[in-house]
Amino acid sequence: MTLVFSAFLKAFGQFFDPRMQRVLVKTLLVTLLIFVTLAGALWFAIAQGLEWALIPFLPEDYEGAAAAVATILISLILFWLLFRVVALAVLQFFADEVVAAVEAHHYPDAAERATPLPLQVEIALSLRGAARALVFNGLALPVALFLMITAIGPALVFLFVNAVLLGRELTDMAWLRHCEGDVKGNPVPRLERFALGAGVAGLMMVPFVNLVAPLIGAVAGTHVVQTRRTRESAEEEIERA
């Protein structure tokens, strides 16, 4: 667990790197654009539904106000529920840029040997990651609802599920540049992946900090992967000697 803690410290230390800031701005803008587009589509659907269902019972002026209020409320709920999914999916689209910046700064030898991910691979990773997050969080929802009587139960359920998902996604981002076809050979042990994912999932529960948590997680994940790769290489050298 010391490795994961050290990785987070390094990630916060590189947070103000201009390359990190550019990725952060792009990620937040695209994420915001997605939610604004979703809210616009939602408003149109609600307005049309009210017009169809309530005319002539509701005056036209009230229809617009009712649609606006309903859109705002539902959009806020969707933002709270889906922000981590959308933000991580968007970040995965820019993942290669994040990992390359970390490697160039801390692991220049690894950066030279890395294979940049093609655009179609980045898109596929982004979509697959979002799909996994939606499916597993959806499966966890009934359990979370059942545990609502415990107050803290739902938070723990989603923390566990997202810790598993985030630990995998955030280390795969870095590993795929060096996997040489072995996409399932992620060198980070499951316990360390879980600790990394739990740390990022915890940050995502903190207001405002959750806006930068995916980026911090991607940087920390890169440090964990590269440290593990370095240790494995050293062990192999010792064995050969």
Image (tube, rainbow, N blue to C red):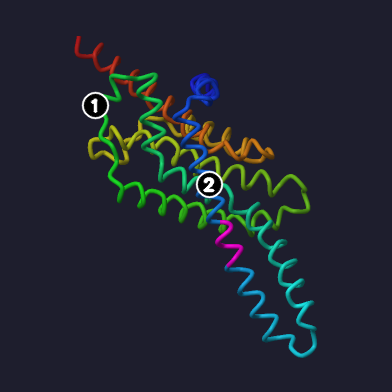
Q: Name the outermost residue toward the left.
A: 240
Placement of 11 over or under 26, stated as above or below:
above
Which residue range is magenta in the image? 35-40
Residue at image coords 53%, 25%: 16
The relative height of residue 156 versus residue 226 in the rendered view (above or below) is below
Decide whether the magenta segment is chiefly helix, strand or loop: helix
**Percent from the top left, x then y, of residue 141?**
62, 57
Q: Is residue 179 left or right of residue 95?
A: left
In the rendered structure, the answer to whether residue 166 lies left or right of residue 239 reads: right
| Residue beneath disc 1 | 113
Residue 166 belongs to the span the image colors magenta:
no
Residue linked to disc 2 = 29
Horizontal side of 95 relative to 237 (left or right) equals right
Q: Position of residue 178 (x, y in %)?
A: 28, 32
Q: Residue 181, which numbered label?
A: none
Side (left or right) of 145 relative to 94:
right
